[in-house]
Image: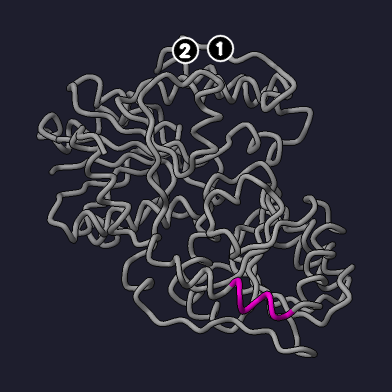
Amino acid sequence: MKIAIFTDVFLDITGGIVTSIRAQKNQLEKLGHEVYLFTSGFKRSEAEIRKLADKNIFIVPTCKVFFKPLVPIARRPAKIEKWVLKNFPEFPNFDVVHVHYEGGCSIAGIRLAKKYKIRLVQTMHGREDEGVHDMVPAPFRLIVATLLNWFHSWYLPHESKVKKDNNLARSRASAKMWTLMVNHANQADVVLTPSHHFGAKLKEYGVKRPMDVVSNGVEDDFVLEKVPVRELKPGNKFNIIWNSRLDKNKHIMQFLEALTMVKCPYSLSAFGDGLEEKKAKRYAKKHNLNVKFYGHIERDLILEKMNNCQLSVLASYHFDNQPMTIVEAVVRGMPVLICDPDMKEIMPSGGYVLADGPEPADLAKAIDELYEHPEKIAKMSETMIKHRGEKKQSIQVEKLLKVYSGSKK
């Protein structure tokens, strides 16, 4: 098959979505499919552009000023469409367009698929409503959400409108972001989600297109590697790993506050960067926390370093849908501490601990209780190892190809 992937999240940014898309692309290519990836990205040398092109990765027209150096923002969809058709006149011959995210590049992918009647698959990754609340200061949330809606509706029809309620659309800004997400998803022939609980939320707010679940996966080579059963010997230090962005929506500051409350000896290895990285480092230094910040490093190195830890932590609450943090923890046989009940769906029963809530005191209590019962760590680790094969990317791509071809599971 000839597959076009459009995503606003890939180059010059880190995170689970990037890892998931890269793993899908690699596995599809191993199976002999031709995959072209179109994405936004910061300016590069001609040599770097050629190197990316050799991997069938192409940078669409991108804003040179806005949000640099935080994230690359694609230019308006009409300009991207024109660029794609000029550089890839064979585009009408693609078999599938697979769109990730909801920005300008992704919108262009939708419009091109509609124009040439190419099968359109849309993966809905995230809770953009929560993103607005976590990342935008309160006085500007409604303004930002309104502008994003206006931009989106300029290029794609908004036939559904979500109103403020007492559930997920708890503010006018949240309602506008749900309006954007729902109308974006309703453009597709098939909507994919990484988890059932997120799919249910999308249906509740108005997504009417056929929907399926394709889990995030990890490269098969990592799954086939032998990993140790985690053990915590009484009296030893509790080695904990943070394998998420250092952002507000991941609740890094709440977790660092929890570490000021724990009674057991611990060490935290924090992998990832983000908008709260400097703040987190200052807080850790001020409170003399036993934390080492590694920043952004290659994923395979993180997976190797996991072998020296006994617990992975995901402190986000009502934000994530199926974070790679958890997927990778399962693959590495790593017990996980969560505080969001929705995350139970995507892990083997018996492989995780659910804190009483998302507050620092809840997280600290859960850590201390685990330390007092170290035998639980080995049992949780054994459960994860037993189920790690389910996270192979090859298994997930088999499901994806059935969606691409339109065959029923």
Q: At label 1, which amino acid type do we have?
A: Lys
Expressed as whole percent of the image width and height from the top left, the position of residue 246 reads 66, 58
- Dot 1: element: loop
Q: Is residue 122 above or below residue 170?
A: below
Specify the quadrant that holds the C terminus: top left
Q: At label 2, which amino acid type do we have?
A: His
Kindly give the residue lying farthest to the top in the view shown. 159
On the rendered structure, is 209 left or right of 266?
left
Q: Residues within 10 Å of mark 1 (few under 14, many from 20)?
A: some
Q: How many marks?
A: 2
On the rendered structure, is 38 left or right of 73?
left
Q: Which residue is mark 1?
A: 161
Q: Quadrant of residue 176?
A: top right
Q: Which residues are magenta?
A: 374-380
On the rendered structure, is 325 left or right of 289?
left
The residue that appears at 63% across and 38% down in the rendered structure is 131
> Which-is-in-front pick, marks 1 and 2?
1
Identify the mark at residue 158; answer none if there is no mark.
2
Q: Quadrant of residue 146?
A: top right
Q: Quadrant of residue 214?
A: top left
Look at the image and say whether residue 123 sits in the magenta stretch.
no
- Dot 2: element: loop
Expressed as whole percent of the image width and height from the top left, the position of residue 185 reads 42, 26
